Amino acid sequence: MSERPKRVLIVGLGGLGCPVAAILARASSAELWLCDDDEVDLTNLHRQILYRDADVGTHKLDAARKTLILGGVDPSRLVSHRARLLPDNARQLVSEVDVVVEGADNFATKFLAADAARLVGRPIVHGAAVRFVGTAWAVAAQGAPCYRCLFEDVPPGAQQGCTEAGVMGPVVGLCGALMADLTLRVLQGDATAFGSLYTYDGQTDRLRQVPATRRSDCPLCGSAPSIRDLAESRYTNPSCAA
Ligand SMILES: [Zn+2]
């Protein structure tokens, strides 16, 4: 019996998810599970490269799917989930894929994806971009160091997402390409993909690779973790504190 294709869940089809999907569609044979509930907005077109002006107002999933198929991707490789990642669907969705790619634009979804990946035991690639700075890193299936090792609480300035603070389109594209590269390495079983935080500063053109460190008191992957489920209350507070 032939093995099923690898499955990659892409959470968020915005400025990060678009380049990730475009690259993985052509550079891998993985199924792409696309998760978003949003519509294409004119003001985001400069960084959301799967969409055209004519797509404004239509659902991102439909527009992304159309562009990927026009580019030659077999429709059978694209699985659409027209929903937000939420506490009541996250565990199921994450458990059905091999790798999670999180390019969400809000901290509630980022923490939820991180927690679900850790609890279910899946590797996850995180990405974020605000103004001139983008970050990307991969967390192994066993989950340490994890997202909460670095961002246990809201980092300074975190109330501003890219929507409020603005973001340079090319920085987002570069960050998405880094995320796609990490995902390909994870799919290939490359253990060196894990453990480093990549940051790119578009004002200085500096790309840095910083070791991510596990915190023994991390609430998710520490020696006595307090997060053992996806309780809804943990993700409804905008501050997303653990
Ligand atoms: Zn941790």
Image: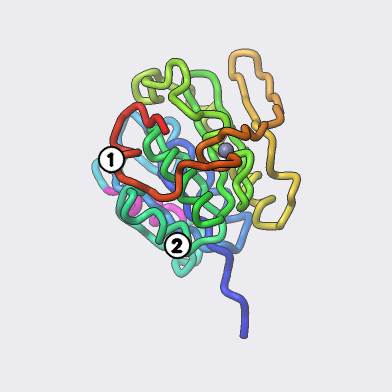
Left or right: 153, with 138 as reference point: left
Kind of residue sitting beneath label 1:
Val
Left or right: 146, with 65 as reference point: right
- x then y, percent, for residue 136: 59, 35
Which residue is tagged 1? 56
Q: Is 183 one of the magenta-colored residues?
A: no
Query: In this view of the protein, which residue sits in the foreground, 69 or 6?
Result: 6
Which quadrant: the C terminus? top left
Q: How is the image coloured?
A: rainbow
Q: Is residue 232 visible?
A: yes
State the separation of the CA atoms marked 1 and 2: 21 Å
Question: At x 39% / y 25%, what residue is drawn?
Answer: 161
Does residue 104 sit above or below 152 in this rendering?
Answer: below
Kind of residue sitting beneath label 2:
Leu
Question: At x 35% / y 26%, what residue is drawn?
Answer: 239
Q: Residue furthest top?
A: 204
Does residue 43 sit above or below 75 in this rendering?
Answer: above
What kind of element bears circle 2? strand
Left or right: 46, with 2 as reference point: left
Which quadrant: the N terminus? bottom right
| Bounds of the magenta segment | 59-68
Q: Residues within 10 Å of mark 2 (few under 14, many from 20)?
A: many
- x then y, percent, for residue 103: 47, 40
What kind of element bears circle 1? loop
Query: In this view of the protein, which residue sits in the foreground, 237 or 27?
Result: 237
Which residue is tagged 2? 78
Q: Specify the quadrant of the image occupied by residue 194.
A: top right
Q: Residue furthest front?
A: 224
Of badges 1 and 2, nearer the viewer stands 2
Q: Main secondary structure of the magenta part?
A: helix
Image-quarter location of ligand 1: top right
